[in-house]
Image: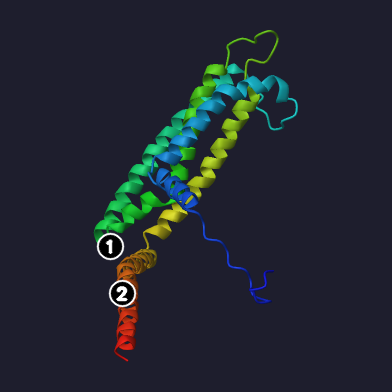
Amino acid sequence: MTASQEPGVAAPTPAPSKNALGAKRLLRRAFEPFWVIPALWCVGALIAGIFVPSLDSTLSQYVPLLFQAGPEGARTFLSSIAGAMISVTGLVFSITIVVLQLASSQFSPRVLRTFLDERVPQFTLGIFTASFVYALTLMRSVAGTPVDGASSVPQIGVTIAFLLVLLSVGIFLAFIHHITQAISVDTIIQTVGKETGSLLKRSAKERDEPATLVNDAEGLRGASHGGRSDEWLCELH
């Protein structure tokens, strides 16, 4: 504790540097587009579909709930996942866009923009498309006959595909709940009120900053003139 600091008074927190604020702003802008998070999910699923089968021979005995069927069963399972996920993705989001367009025409155009800015639809699309890409990539690792006495089915990979399907079902239920809440009148009014309030605060702050600078400049000018007038009065006396 310094001598000038009073006891019991917390030290002021240092303001974040300009570099940290610039990095946060750049990161926020990088994740603003709707396609960024789904694209990252797809890239991760593609990498996992390529490298997970190589871990099957070393980790299969330690991982429970493994897929026990043969190559034909694995191909059928993975092809069913790929076909179902791409169909569900197209159907769900096409119907959602229609519903949001109707809601935006009846209530406010902000409904569609708010939907595109939120994370739940982005993660939903990402998990759906990642399940499709992962299942499609993993099918290339299912061999027709065993190689070198090893299993021709990547059991860990197929088990992960099954877990992705379960995750997709859970995120689908969360997505339906989110959409039903997002198009309700109360939520739309609250969203519009929050956006309007933040816009007014930001505009008032931008309007007050030039006025503060002008007042400071006038105060400095008045102080300099006041010093000169005092000198002139002293010379008269």
| Extreme residue in the right direction | 62
Q: Is residue 70 above or below residue 84?
A: above
The amino acid on which the numbered mark 1 sits, given as a three-letter code, is Phe
Furthest residue to the top?
Answer: 148
Name the kind of residue labelled 2 in the image. Answer: Arg
Near-viewer residue (17 or 121): 17
Q: Which quadrant would the C terminus be assigned to in this image? A: bottom left
Question: Which of the marked residues, 2 or 1, is nearer the chain's N terminus?
Answer: 1
- Mark 2–mark 1 distance (CA, rounded to whole Å): 53 Å
Q: Is residue 3 above or below residue 100?
A: below
Dot 1 falls on a residue whose secondary structure is loop
CB atoms of marks 2 and 1 within 8 Å: no
Dot 2 alpha-carbon crowd within 10 angstroms: few under 14, some 14 to 19, many 20 or more: few
Q: Is residue 107 above or below residue 33?
A: below
Q: Name the residue under label 2.
A: 221
Q: Is residue 6 visible?
A: yes
Of residues 111 and 223, the one drawn nearer to the viewer in this rendering: 223
Give residue 211's position: percent from left, percent from top.
30, 71
Residue 29 spot, x, y in % from top left: 40, 47
Answer yes or no: is residue 60 visible: no
Q: Where is residue 195 in the image (x, y as percent from the top left)?
A: 35, 64
Residue 223: quadrant of the picture: bottom left
Residue that label 1 marks: 107
Q: Mark 2 falls on what kind of element? A: helix
Residue 107, percent from left and from top? 28, 62
Callout 1 environment at 10 Å: few (<14), some (14 to 19), or many (20+)? some
